[in-house]
Amino acid sequence: MRTQVAIIGAGPAGLLLSQLLHNRGIDSVVLEARSREYCEQRQRAGMLEQATVDVLREAGAADRLDREGLVHHGIHLRFAGRDRHIDFPSRTGGRSVTVYGQTEIVKDLIAKRVDEGARLYFDTPVTAIEGIEGDAPRIRFVRDGVEETLDCDLVAGCDGFHGVSRPTIPADVLKTYERSYPFAWLGVLADVAPSTDDLIYAYSERGFALHSMRSAQVSRLYLQVDPDAKLADWPDERIWAELRERLALPGWTLDEGPISERGITPMRSFVAEPMSFGRLFLAGDAAHIVPPTGAKGLNLAMADVRVLADACGEWFGSGGSRDGLDAYSDACLRRVWRAEHFSYWMTTLLHTGVDASEFDRRCQVAHLEYVADSDAAMASLAENYVGYAWGS
Ligand code: APR
Ligand code: PHB
């Protein structure tokens, strides 16, 4: 097999890249280790920056998003019996965010790619990437139990944190930066109308809680839990009791309903530099991970791919320029590090450290009060949350 761009991974990054390349007349093959059903059912976050909505529209994959996405103009910051609503448009030149599950984006992109006859292969794990330092890379993969090869001009490593792409970059070239957190998130989907208009980020001495949503009938809720917590430790009644305590506010009640899905996600910050080497380009979780508190993971993945698709357009276009590809890593890393800092900041602002001293807790509440009282602090949170735009 041969193609112009070999894309490893059919998560949101790989799928969107394949669509953007197709729209620019560039051929690609997507190789995905898991089944289509698995990819379409994996529950992930779902808060989209305006730039993410825009690139999905540009790709022609936003029909359902435009119908079903829930536009949000701010968030609630809840702590110490207070609820501060932080409005975004008034602080960011009119920008907002949209709630639409990553799972739905993946379903929409797969349906469109399959409709257009894309070479998108599920149950097809890549086992090796060869020749990225030369001009004829080759991918080895297994399909129906048989080892095959794919020759290409460029390789897009969109295979997530545990993929094979990042380790292909020589160890003496690749630098990684990492931070782990002493907690995880327990996330649930519940068949009950959200008890709030905008998302609630709640700090309490018992730990962090987040009230999000997926539709007018479905709520998405998260709890900070121990990093080694098991789902068996968290029967439904304990989940609701803990959510009630952590989200409590006088005069407000949390509506409860049947839980249809649950999962525990570890929290980690991670960046790999550079994001490209020779003919290999990393995008999305393959290159960087953020804790979910700032809702940046999906948005960063989409932003990488937008830059990469433009750079591929220049390279395969009539000018044949490699400038965009050469600038790819630095261009992405600037945005990545901004989001890394914001996500780390939101995480440490809102979670209770297991070994936090009373001094730490007092500082944390003072910090929350400052964010909830200072226009400058709220503007800073807002401009980062909607996606910081340099020079605007
Ligand atoms: N061969 C083929 N596919 C692979 C391989 C391999 N060796 N290894 C991993 N994959 C696939 C995984 O099965 C997965 O479907 O790569 C895909 C990577 O997809 P994601 O993990 O969704 O990563 P990405 O597309 O970068 O999306 C980032 O996911 O974790 C969230 O917060 C994050 O929202 C962000 C988004
Ligand atoms: C979600 O709706 O899944 C969500 C929203 C905001 C976050 C994280 C997750 O910060």
Image (cartoon, rainbow, N blue to C red):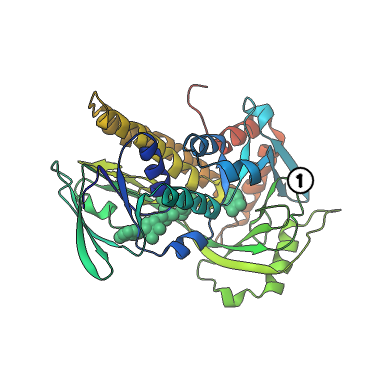
Q: Secondary structure at mark 1?
A: strand
Q: Percent x, y for residue 91? A: 65, 28
Q: Is residue 237 above or below residue 4?
A: below
* Image quadrant where residue 208 sits: bottom right
Q: Between 140 and 287, which is closer to the camera in this rendering?
A: 140
Q: Nearer the viewer, residue 43 or 387?
A: 43
- The answer to whether one can see residue 268 in this image is no
x, y percentage for residue 347? 55, 50
| Image x and y of residue 105, in percent | 52, 49
> Left or right: where does residue 256 sit relative to residue 163?
right
Give the residue type that dot 1 points to: Asp
Where is residue 177 drawn, in percent x and y? 35, 48
Q: Residue at x 50, y 28 (%)?
A: 389
Residue at (25, 71) in percent of width and height: 145
Give left or right: position of 155 versus 130: right
- Residue wearing tag 1: 83
Number of other residues with Cα within 10 Å of mark 1, as a class: few under 14, some 14 to 19, many 20 or more: some
Res. 217 visible in picture: yes
In the image, taking residue 88 as reference, residue 353 lies left or right, namely: left
Q: Residue at x 74, y 66 (%)?
A: 257
Determine the residue located farthest toward the left in the rendered image. 134
Question: Please, is residue 72 above or below residue 37 in the view?
Answer: above
